[in-house]
Image (cartoon, coloured by chain):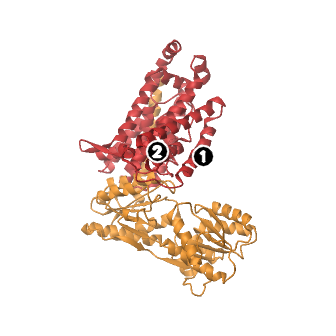
Chain colours: A orange, B red
Amino acid sequence: MSRTTRTSRSALAAAALTTAAALTLAACGSGSGSSPAGGSSDSVKVGLITKTDTNPFFVKMKEGAEQAAKKHGAELLTAAGKFDGDNAGQVTAIENMVASGVKGILLTPSDSKAIVPAIEKARAKGVLVIALDTPTEPQSAVDALFATDNLKAGELIGQYAKTAMAGKAAKIATLDLAPGVSVGVQRHNGFLKGFGIKEGDPSVVCSQDTGGDQAKGQTAMENCLQKEPDINVVYTINEPAALGAYTALKAKGREKDVLIVSVDGGCTGTQAVKDGKIAATSQQYPLKMAAQGVEAVVNYAEDDKKKASGYTDTGVTLVTDKAQGGVTSEDTGYGLENCWG
Amino acid sequence: MTATTTPYSELAAPSTARRLLAAPTTGPLVALLVACAFFSVSTDQFLTGGNFSLIVQQVMVVGTLAIGQTLIILTAGIDLSCGAVMAFGSIMIAKMAAEGSLPPLVAIALGIGVCGGFGLLNGLLVQKIPLPPFIVTLGMLNVAFALTHIYSEEQTISNLPGPLTALGETFPLGNTDITYGSLVTIGLFLLLAYALSSTGWGRHVYALGNSPEAARLNGIRTSRLTIGVYTAAGLLYGIAALLLISRTGVGDPQAGQTDNLDSITAVVLGGTSLFGGRGSVLGTFIGVLIVGVFRNGLQLMGVASIYQTLITGILVILAVTVDQLSRKKAR
C-alpha cells in the first residue's frame, strides 16, 4: 500500500515538473515569437516551413520572413523538418498551420513530389501556397514559386571556369548533391552548359555526391584525386562542399593550381572567395525569397485574390575577385554585403 | 501448454494487477491532460474535434511502430530498424502496386509480409546466434535503408491506386472528419493491450523481460517467444507502412529516418521501462499523444518547431527518471 502511494506521488511530482517545464518553455517560445498571442485574431497569419531549421540558408530565409511580417503587421508561424528529406514532418507542419488559420504558407519542399498531396489539401481550404527556393513536381502544385534560377547559377560558374581556363585542357571533378534532387541536378547541368560540354563529356573525370556536406565533400575530393590526380577544375554544389574540396586539395599541395567554383553565396563561402580558396561563386538571395513570399500572402489577405503565380526569379550574382572578361561579376565587397548566414 | 501456463499466470496475476494500478501510465496520463488543458487555454483552435482528429492522424504511423517497439522493449530488447523496415515496406507496396501491375491488395499483403520477414530475421539473429538486439537492429537499419534506396532508385512513387490510400480517407463523426487509418491504429493498440494484459502470451512477454532465466525455468519457451515478438513487431511495421502511404499519398524513400528514435521516445514517455518487463501499450499510446499534442499545440501557438524538440527531450529525461526512481523504491 505504502509503495503504491509513493509511486503515485513521484508520478505526480513528475507531472508537475513536466507542466512547469512546458509552461516555462512555451512562454519563452511565444515571447521570442513574432507576435503577441492577443494580436492573433486580427492580424494575417503566414506560415513558413523550411527543410530544416539549422541550415544558415533557412535561418536567413526565416529572418527575411520575420522582417517582412513585422513590416506588414502579419503574424509569422515557422516550422521545419527534422532533417533534409523529412516529408512527413513538413506534412504535419502544413496541417497544423492550416488548423491554426494561416492565410498562406511559404514552403521549401524537402521532397518535391511527396509533399504535393498535402499542398493540394491546404489549397483546397483556400490557403495560398508558395514554394521558396525549391520547386514542387509538378511546379503547378503550388500557387507560385519564388526561387533562384539554379540552372543559371550553374551556367554562370561554368562560363567563368571556361574563360578562366583560357583554352587549357580541363579535367573536371563535380561534387554534386544527391541523386534525383532537382536543385543539384539543375546546378550540375547548368555548369556543364556554361562550360560548353554535355553530360558524359570525357573532361569530367570524377562525379561524386556530397549531400552538400563539408566532410563528405572532403572525402569525395580525396577519392577523386586518388582516381585522377591531375584534376584542375572542381565544380561544387555549395560552399561547404567547396571548402571540403579545398581541404583535400591543400593536403596534396594542389590548392593553388586548381580552380574551385561553387553556388550559394553564404557569408562563410563568400569570405572563402575573398581568401582565394574558392575562385567564384553564384550568390543567391534567400532573404528576398521569403520577404516577397510574405508580401504575396499579405496581398492575398487584403482582397482574397490570388495574384502571385508562376515562377519569380529572385536573382543570382556571380561573385569573384578575379573577374574574367565577358562574364559579368561583382567583387567580394558586394558579395559580403549581400551574403546570408 | 495449458499445463505450464496456468501455474505461471497464477503467480503473475497479482504483480500484473499491481503493475496496472501502481501505474507507470499515471504520470504520462496526467502530463497529457495537463498539456491539453494548457493548450486549450492558450489557443482557441486547440480544443476542437477536428484538431484532435488531426493529432491522431499525425501520430498514427509512429504510434503503430511504437506498438511493435513496446513489445520488443518489454522483452528488454530494442529495435532501431523499425522506421527503415517500414520505409522499405512502403516503397515495396507503392512500387509493386503502381508499377509492377500487381493487384493493390496483393502488393499490400506482400509488403506487410516482407516487414514481418525482417522482424523474423531480427528475432532469429537475437535469439539463435545470439546477438545483442541493439547491434542486430542497427545493422538491419542500414540494410533496410539501403534496400529502400536501391529498390526505389531514389524516386518518390506517386499516382498510387485507390486501395493504397483508402485508410487516409475520412468519414464524418458529428462535425469531425476521422480517417480510417486512425481507427486501425487505435484498434491495434486495444488489441495488443488486451493480448498483453489478458492472455498467457502477454504474461509470458512480461516474464521474459523481467528475467529470461526465470521465465525459461517456469516452462516458457523463451526462444520461440522472442522470435515471435520480433516477427509480430515486423508485421506491425508493415501495417505502419500502409498507414504511411495512405497518409502522405506517395511512396517516399526518405521516410522514417527518425522514426526509430521517435517510437522509442513514445514508449519511454508512456512509462515503459527500457530494462524490460514493465510498461504497457496503452502507456505508449499516451506517449505518442503527448508528442503529437505538444507538436500541434506549440505550432498553433506560433512557437518555432525547435522548441518542440527541446520539450520532447526534457520530457524523455523526466520519464526515464521517474522510471528509475520508482524501480528503486519498488526494490
Residue A20: quarter of image: top left
Q: Secondary structure beneath disc 2?
A: helix
Can residue B69 be seen?
no
Position of residue A192 measured from the top left corner of the image (x, y, whole percent): 58, 73
Residue pictured at 55% horizontal, 51% vertical: B149
Comparing B228 with B38, the one in front is B228
- Decide if residue B59 is on the left or right side of residue A206: left
Q: Which residue is mark 2?
A: B93
Q: Which residue is mark 1?
A: B142
Amino acid on which the number 2 mark rests in the picture: Ile
Q: Does dot 1 land on a helix, a strand or a loop?
A: helix
The amino acid type of the residue labelled 1 equals Asn
B132 up-or-down from B293: above or below: above
Q: Where residue B251 sits: x, y (%)?
A: 46, 50
Asked where in the image residue B64 lies, by quadrant, the reply is: top left
Snapshot quadrant of residue B33: top left
Q: State whether residue B206 appears in this view.
A: yes
How many C-alpha atoms fall within 10 Å of the one at disc 2: few (<14), some, or many (≥20)? many
Q: Could you tell me residue B256's position as x and y percent?
A: 50, 47
